[in-house]
């Protein structure tokens, strides 16, 4: 026990040293990022979208984005499974002057998702699609193959996203304009061991967004990947209820998170990552030598995160 405690103390001391070394670099990197974005034109304002489709819009970030985008002469198409919660979001958006259509869809039903997206884009000509719907889950239960658990997760988090954006992007391609936002996660950069399948699904979205953005740009389509850390949403609350330990300072308010996203989309940012207090430790860990990552995983297993939900 004493050896383990001493090892943990050494590990924490090393993290402190690394944090101090990188503290100055972070400020410099932020400045360089802004310069690069300005040179490449990523800070150019994007015209305000008049027709917006948001999946996972019944609660959390999706619902708050709908409310923040709601205004007169704006049409919102809100998609989720829970119609009761969708109706509440619809009412709030309509009170702000928006025209709102809602639809109940299971994002793992690929045929239904593709059919609806094709239909609604022909009717509305979507300017901005935010593929926000997703689930998180614990490792497989005893006796269950991990492939079955992973299949359910990827059906929603990866293929649900693809089946959402592909039909709409086809319409955008013909129109020569449009904007696509894909909701990934900081777990797509480096994940908690108990969320390995979730992290893998979000990593797929990060990789797709990174490599497909220039292809989409040639067709007049702006593509952004959103990587939030912990945000005060029902999903995070379920993690707490399942025994996850999340310090209050590490969880961002959902209104503030949605504001960061809308501002980033207005500037056509290729990636929107927040909050900084979570991003930098995760990013630094992702580029550390394997033995440090192994130590992080060992420590992380003491703070389990769990939960499974589809909005």
Image (cartoon, grey):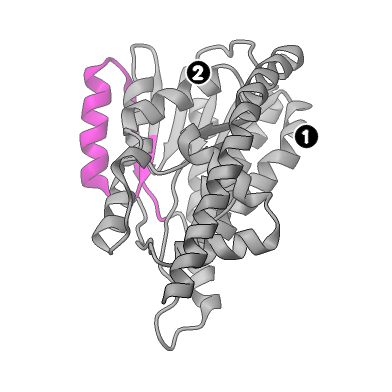
- Specify few, some or many for label 1: CA neighbours under 10 Å numbering under 14, 14-19, or 20 or more: few
Q: Residue at x 70, y 57 (%)?
A: 289
Residue 37 image point, x, y percent: 69, 18
Whole-number angstrom distance, CA of label 2 to CA of label 1: 21 Å
Number of on-image labels: 2
- Viewer-closest of 132 and 114: 132
Q: Magenta segment: does it hold 87? A: yes
- Viewer-closest of 60 and 179: 60
- Residue 276 image label: none
Rendered position, 271 above or below 39: below
Is residue 14 rendered to the left or right of residue 137?
A: right
Is residue 197 visible to us here?
Answer: no
Residue 101 image point, x, y percent: 34, 32
Is residue 30 visible to us here?
Answer: yes
- Viewer-closest of 184 and 240: 240
Disc with the residue nearer the chain's start (2 vs 1): 2
Which image quarter: residue 71? top left
Q: Residue at x 66, y 29 (%)?
A: 25
Q: Secondary structure at mark 1?
A: helix
Q: Residue at x 35, y 50 (%)?
A: 311
Is residue 283 rendered to the left or right of residue 256?
A: right
Residue at the bottom extreme of this rendering: 143
Q: Magenta segment: does it hold 311? A: no
Label 1 sits on residue: 215
Q: Residue at x 68, y 49 (%)?
A: 287
- Residue 49 image label: 2
- Specify few, some or many for label 2: CA neighbours under 10 Å numbering under 14, 14-19, or 20 or more: some
Rendered position, 145 above or below 304: below
Please provide the residue range marked out in magenta: 78-106
Residue 268 image point, x, y percent: 61, 21
């Amino acid at each position: 026990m004493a050896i383990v405690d001493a090892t943990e103390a050494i590990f924490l001391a090393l993290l402190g040293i690394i944090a101090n070394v990188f503290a100055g670099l972070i400020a410099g990197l932020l400045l360089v990022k802004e310069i690069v974005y300005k040179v490449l034109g990523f800070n150019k304002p994007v015209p305000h979208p008049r027709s917006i489709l948001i999946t996972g819009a019944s609660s959390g970030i999706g619902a708050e984005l709908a409310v923040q985008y709601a205004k007169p002469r704006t049409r919102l198409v809100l998609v989720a499974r829970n119609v009761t919660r969708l109706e509440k979001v619809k009412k709030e958006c309509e009170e702000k002057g928006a025209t709102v259509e809602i639809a109940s869809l299971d994002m793992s039903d690929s045929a239904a998702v593709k059919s609806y997206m094709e239909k609604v884009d022909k009717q509305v000509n979507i300017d901005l699609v935010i593929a926000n719907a997703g689930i998180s889950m614990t490792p497989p239960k005893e006796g269950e193959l991990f492939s079955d658990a992973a299949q359910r997760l990827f059906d929603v988090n990866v293929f649900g996203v693809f089946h959402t954006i592909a039909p709409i992007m086809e319409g955008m391609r013909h129109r020569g304009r449009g904007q696509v936002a894909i909701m990934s996660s900081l777990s797509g950069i480096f994940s908690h061991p108990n969320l390995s399948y979730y992290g893998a699904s979000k990593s797929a979205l990060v990789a797709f967004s990174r490599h497909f953005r220039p292809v989409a740009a040639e067709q007049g389509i702006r593509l952004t990947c959103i990587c939030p850390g912990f945000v005060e949403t029902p999903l995070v609350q379920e993690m707490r209820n399942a025994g996850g330990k999340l310090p209050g300072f590490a969880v961002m308010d959902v209104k503030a998170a949605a504001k960061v996203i809308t501002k980033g989309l207005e500037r056509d940012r290729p990636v929107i990552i927040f909050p900084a207090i979570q991003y930098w430790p995760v990013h630094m860990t992702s580029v550390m030598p394997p033995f440090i990552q192994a130590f992080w995983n060992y420590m992380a297993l003491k703070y389990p995160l769990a939960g499974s939900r589809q909005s």
